[in-house]
Amino acid sequence: MTVNLLDLDLEGLAVFCERLGEKRFRAVQLFRWIHQKGASQFDDMSDLAKSLREKLKGVACIQPMPVVSQNLSTDGTIKWLFDVGDGNAVESVFIPEDDRGTLCVSSQAGCAVGCRFCSTGHQGFSRNLTTGEIIAQLWFAEHFLRKHLKRDDRVISNVVMMGMGEPLQNYTELLPALRVMLDDHGYGLSRRRVTVSTSGVVPMMDRLSLDCPVALAVSLHAPNDLLRNQLVPLNLKYPLVELMEACQRYLLHAPRDFITFEYCMLDGVNDLDEHAHELIRLVRAYPGAWCKFNLIPFNPFPASGLHRSKPDRVMVFSRILSAAGITTTVRKTRGEDIDAACGQLAGDVKDRTRAVERMARQRTIPIQPFRHAATTTLKA
């Protein structure tokens, strides 16, 4: 069976090379060609012996995911739709800023958590992505951007596992992907600049803290169990007291001295002054300045029945938290015009199944330059 080398972290690739009768240093060479140089053909790997290249052709491949579409927002955000087969697709989003380039990566096709304010969750769950499918999003985006921005240095400095899916419900495939992102022979990202976002899968938070502690963001969205049960159904299994204690345990290993709490602002639902004061009491039950809040504007979709909090309400809510000594930011919405903002990813993927199937029949998808138009959709 042919092995997709995007599925392997460096240790896995070393084992693979040893099985081929090759020394482990060949794995480092391969790893660099794949991830640092973006090679997809073994013939391009000029410092590998020809005999090894021929051997690899028979047992391995570097298989990216077909790109169905590419959209560019007026604010520079880029969204890609990738075909993962069987009529399923996932999306990744690149967010350029003055001091960094952030890629939002998906871990599942759909999501099983079913948060009420998230269109991805409303779509339902199809399947977990493989390690190779998680990494393929970064592999494609990094090397595509280098080419089209005419840059030799790294474009993506930050990765956030905040795309489609609950990353910690796909832990087995997530862990090697994180190791590839962090490896100096791969993408060389700092643990502080790789963030896993979770709705609160407590046992896997504990495992991540020991296996590969990266920055952690927790989708909180409510100050009490009664409300959070309605907004984030996973809370029924792991209520707030268990979640808060897991956050405290994670901090013992985390690369940062704080946990980020994401809080989607919903008009009249969780944005009242009393909710802000409840949040203060919740986090003050644990000593120290150990968390930050990121208030997120809700991105509406018809099936939610919810509305975005008004800007002045968000500001009042933010001031209450800040006055209590809690660092609080209000997330700037990016990519909203191309449905790339938080909670919008792949909300209409089901409507694009025919396009996905059509693209899947093609081995290559022409990628057009995106510099001339505000929105570009790639055609078959």
Image (cartoon, rainbow, N blue to C red):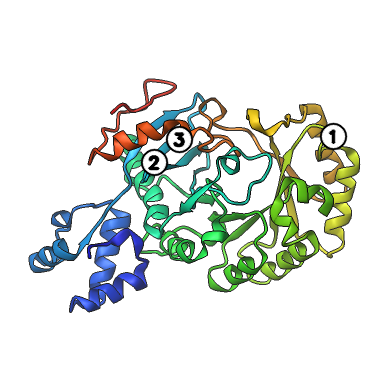
Where residue 83 sits in the image (x, y, percent)?
Answer: 37, 42
Where residue 341 sits in the image (x, y, percent)?
Answer: 57, 35
Secondary structure of the residue carrying numbered label 1: helix
The residue carrying mark 3 is 79
- Residue at the spot x=54%, y=35% of the render? 347
What is the number of the mark on residue 316? Answer: 1
Relative to 108, is 150 on the left or the right? left
Camera-nearest residue between 157 and 87: 87
Q: Nearer the viewer, mark 2 or mark 1?
A: 2
- Residue at the spot x=32%, y=28% of the render? 369
Q: Is residue 115 above or below residue 249?
A: above
Q: Is any atom of residue 151 visible in this view? A: no
The residue carrying mark 2 is 87
Mark pair 2, 1: CA separation: 44 Å
Q: How many marks?
A: 3
Camera-nearest residue between 323 and 178: 178
Q: Which mark is first along the chain, 3 or 2?
A: 3
Secondary structure of the residue carrying numbered label 2: loop
Q: Which mark is first along the chain, 1 or 3?
A: 3
Mark pair 2, 3: CA separation: 19 Å
Q: Nearer the viewer, mark 3 or mark 1?
A: 3
Name the amino acid type tagged 2: Gly
Q: Is any atom of residue 319 visible in this view? A: yes
Where residue 371 sits in the image (x, y, percent)?
Answer: 37, 25
